[in-house]
Image: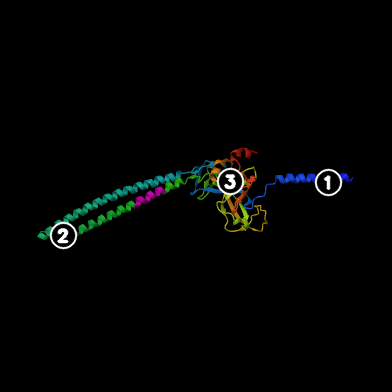
Amino acid sequence: MKIRNVLFTAAVLLVAVGGYSWYSGRQPAPLPGDIAFGNGQVEAVQVDISSKIAGRVQEVLVSEGAVVEPDQVLARLDRRTLEATKAQAEATLASAEAQVAAAEAAVVQAKAQLTLTEQELARAQQLLAKGHSSQEVTDIRVSERDVAAANVSAAEAAVVSARRNVDAARFAVEEIDSTLEDTELVAPTRGRVLYRLVEPGEVVASGGKLLTMIDLSDVYLEFFLPATQAHLVAIGAEARIRLDIADVTVPATVTFVSPSSQFTPKQVETADERDKLMFRVKVRVPQELVEKYIDYVKTGLRGTAYVRLASEAPSDWPASLALTELDALPDLVKR
């Protein structure tokens, strides 16, 4: 009986030791002291595509999930009312330009009249000097000369006014052209359409949202570190992101460290107690990597960010955080 108990105890010990060895072998190696980590999710900046003007939606050219390029037209508003307004403004501009021509002709006419009155005044003064004319006639010629000079000044002022009217009419046309450009809503950057908020035929107000997209030029993961580690994180420090859904580790760079502490949000898991103050850190995925594998970029994916802390002798990255050969990414995602 005793031998049976001894054998049973030995078997239990063997199983326990084997299980512990198996469990230990599957645990990741402890991180070096100069590498910190935190949990978060992949995010990107959201951009609302809004209309600057009120109008009826004529067409929406993209669907949810579509990848769009910078300056790509995403939607158009009805432009018929604006085009009619532009035609009216162009007619006003043409009329103003004709008024300038008429005012310039009036200047020529006024100057000719001034020249005539000056000649008549000169002859009257000569006749007065010889005694063949009266002072009254000379005074009349002086008055006519002054009136003609005033008419020239008035005609020149009318030209200036007419030209300002032309400028105002031209600016009105340019303003309408600018508004016509606003009927086409374009992508400000490369990104993916997240929400399509309107359909053709709907009327939107000024500032109304038509689409929401994510800016794929700024893909990052945000996590939290305690003060004991956050002060050792430098902007530009090397980092790595390991995704939960696949055996994938990608490079990243620290682009933001909060200058002030805060309580850890409830949705963020940390090893420390939640009542401790933490510092928000953001690591960004290289843009060239995002561009190359843009079809696989999804916001909301959970992952862990690892960041190198300032140290006199930086440690090597553990083998468990070796960068993934991303050429095999399609196969890794399928798994």
Q: Where is residue 61 in the image (x, y as percent from the top left)?
A: 52, 41
Q: Do the residues labelled 1 and 3 touch (CB within 8 Å)?
A: no
**Residues packed near mark 3 inside 10 Å, few (<14), some (14 to 19) or many (20 plus):** many
Residue displayed at 74% across by 45% down: 21
Residue 167's place in the image compared with 140, above or below, is: above
Camera sees residue 63: no
Q: Is mark 3 on a helix, strand or loop?
A: strand
Mark 1 or mark 2: whose residue is earlier in sequence: 1
- What span is colored magenta in the figure? 164-174
Q: Disc number at residue 138?
A: 2
Dot 3 corresponds to which residue?
251
Q: Does label 2 or label 3 sit earlier along the sequence?
A: 2
The residue that mark 1 highlights is: 9
Asked if residue 191 lies left or right of residue 179, the reply is right
View extreme (bottom): residue: 135
Classify mark 1: residues with Cα within 10 Å, few (<14), some (14-19) or many (20+).
few
Q: What element carries label 1?
A: helix
Rounded to the nearest angstrom, the CA distance separating label 2 from label 3 is 98 Å
Q: Which residue is drawn at 45% across and 45% down?
A: 181
Please tell me whether residue 229 belongs to the stretch shown in magenta.
no
For the C terminus, the image quarter is top right
- Which tag, 1 or 3, sits closer to the chain's start? 1
Q: In this view, does 178 lie to the left or right of 141?
A: right
